[in-house]
Image: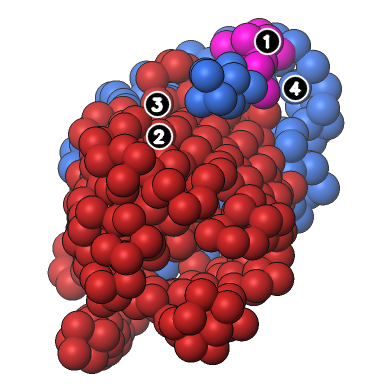
Amino acid sequence: MKKLIFLTLLGLATPAAISPVWADDTLFADMGGQPGIDKVVDASVDAYLADPRIAALFSESNIDRVRAEFKVQFCQVAGGSCQYAGHDMVAAHKGLHLTNADFNAVVEDLQGAMDKTGIGFATQNRFLARLAPMQRQVVTK
Amino acid sequence: MRLLSGLALAVALFSTSAAFAQPTDEADTRAPSRDWFDQGKLLATGGVSQVEGAGGGGLGAWALISGYGSDHGIGVNAHYTTVLLPDYRLDTVGAAIGLFDRLELSYAWAAFDTQAVGAALGLGKGYTFHQNIFGAKLRLFGEAIYDQDQWLPQVSAGLQHKENDRGAVIAAVGGKGAVGTDYYIAASKLFLAQSLLVNATVRFTKANQLGILGFGGNKHDDYAPQVEGSLAYLFSRNFAVGVEGRTKPSNLAIAKEQDAYDLFAAWFPCKEFSITAAYADLGNVVIKDHQRGLYLSVQAGL
């Protein structure tokens, strides 16, 4: 009986109200709108290029175009009124043989960029929660 | 002897890992030499070392694989934990290795000092029970961190084989054996948008006070399902605060064993080191009620 109560409490503490990650329409504003997202993208791309774990992934890329595409994509992911028309995630990462460690290195750099641009930890997590499922399309190795 | 071999294993793991974990010189070529000890998981996602040595919280085992090795790497760590209770003291040291974010092997040596209670029971002041705990955990399915668009948790199955060195005393207090094996299924899920990590575990065990008083007893001598649960709120990438609970069987006629709870805070300054402090309530332990006190644990690894 005690165990049942315990399990029930655990269940209650995990509110049913924990919503699908997309049902959050204040995120774009909480990230500072498009100017905030632009800053995050610029800081994170700078960090990728300076990160020996992943810099080589961008060696063949047109960095200006990468920045521009990320800005539109992040805007859309954050719930802004942008339509990302770039590569789909599978096509964009095809042939790169990315691992979870690569994916996580990108996440860590992005977290650092969001720290640097003043986005709070809870807001960072709301945004990362939307990016996280892309791991299934991006990581192929 | 077991302790010695365990420590030797831990030392061997560390020296091997130190040899492997040299940083690569090639900053801009990806093809060659990737480290086995890649630290490819995100900070804190290996959990800390629970009281029996598995990757988890303080009391409960989690579905996460210990350490920072990614699915292409290996993580190793060692830990020391002390629990300072009003009438007892528990110390554990151990090591764990996580292989390819799939299999975790762990070893812990535990010493439970009965202090003055030992004298009261006629065992002698400072009479101490020792346990060797050999653990294995296999990740079965699910992805606790990435699958933020799904409810499915990460699920692992594990066992902990425990050998206690005080068989005669265990028999005298009504315990049925000095050796026992716990089996568990653990589920872990990070609700990232809420910065909340949730764990629930069902453990099949006969252990009395985690095995310190042996296994099975004159009241019950069968495997009974027990539950472990925890909630951890992430305040930052380095700092989490949470609650844990763990039910335990009550197999011995001499004392009613109670469930355990704690409030914990864990600090992860880097992937190589973490420290966990908790206020733990273990309830009655043999002739002493209200065993509440400080739990402190440090983990270091690669």
Question: Badge 3 is on which residue?
Answer: B153
Looking at the image, which residue is at 79% across and 42% down?
Answer: A120
Q: Nearer the viewer, mark 3 or mark 4?
A: 3
Chain seen in blue:
A
What is the distance, in whole Å, between disc 3 and disc 4 at their CAs? 25 Å
Residue annotated with mark 1: A17
Amino acid type for the residue under numbered disc 4:
Leu
Q: Nearer the viewer, mark 3 or mark 2?
A: 2
The chain holding disc 2 is B
Asked whether the residues under marks 2 and 4 belong to the same chain, the reply is: no
Residue occupying image coordinates x 75% and y 22%: A27
- Location of the N terminus of chain B by quadrant is bottom left
Magenta range? A12-24
Q: Is residue B176 visible?
A: yes
Mark pair 1, 2: CA separation = 28 Å
Label 4 residue SS: helix
CA–CA distance between discs 1 and 4? 17 Å
Parent chain of label 1? A
Q: Which amino acid, mark 2?
A: Gln
Q: CA distance from mark 3 to mark 2?
A: 19 Å
User: Residue at label 4?
Assistant: A27
Question: Which element carries disc 3, helix, strand or loop?
Answer: loop
